[in-house]
Amino acid sequence: MSLSTSLRMKIWYDNAAGVLVDITLKILTMNDIDIQGQNENVRPFGVGMDQFLQSGIGHIEPIELGGLLQTTGLDELDSLFGDRIPEDPDTGTRTFKVDWIGNNARTTEVETTLLSYKRSANKENGLTKVMIRLQPTGEVTEVGLDT
């Protein structure tokens, strides 16, 4: 059994050339990877309690990543996310991948579009932070599920 910890995790994101870039050391915060199914309410007339059936449709909530504003290097967050909004509708998606254990034994991968890229100045602590918001789209690939 391998436990997941932030010390073992790896995070990747496509660069403009479509190559996965390891951004693990650039990320300070990440929200939940929230994969949800959708259900249809099928409560008939004359029944007082809701009843649900699975619809076979799912989605992932937006993914939020936080880090520091750094502008040198092709793998910095500003290079990957800055100056991209608004994107043309014909712009391709970019892959987001998380390796939960650090050995590719348990990964989650999905194509994404960029929803927002926020820079936040902070005069109290001095360092400018960035917040990236990605919209997952399409099928999710998960490797390492116990069957």
Image: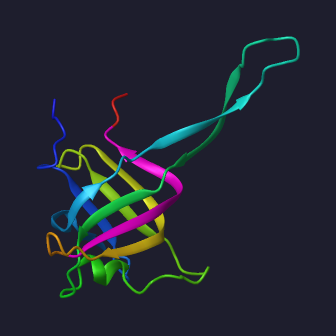
14 relative position to 89: left or right:
left
| Residue 141 within the magenta-colored segment of the rendering | yes
Q: Which of these two is toward me, 13 or 117?
A: 117
Tell me the quadrant of the picture where the N terminus can be found. top left
Q: In this picture, is 49 found above or below 31?
A: above
15 relative position to 111: left or right:
left
Residue 55: x %, y % from top left: 68, 35
Q: Give the total number of marks visible in the rendering.
A: 0
Q: In this picture, is 133 found above or below 104?
A: below
Q: Quadrant of residue 65?
A: bottom left
| Residue 13 within the magenta-colored segment of the rendering | no
Residue at 19% x, 68% y: name it.
26
- Residue found at the far right of this picture: 45
Most common SS among magenta residues = strand
- First to last magenta residue range: 128-144
Residue 73: x %, y % from top left: 19, 86
Residue at 38% x, 77% y: name it.
18
Q: In this picture, is 97 found above or below 46?
A: below
Residue 101: x %, y % from top left: 19, 44
Q: Which of these two is toward me, 31 or 33?
A: 31
Tell me the quadrant of the picture where the C terminus can be found. top left
Q: Quadrant of residue 79?
A: bottom left
Residue at 33% x, 30% y: name it.
146
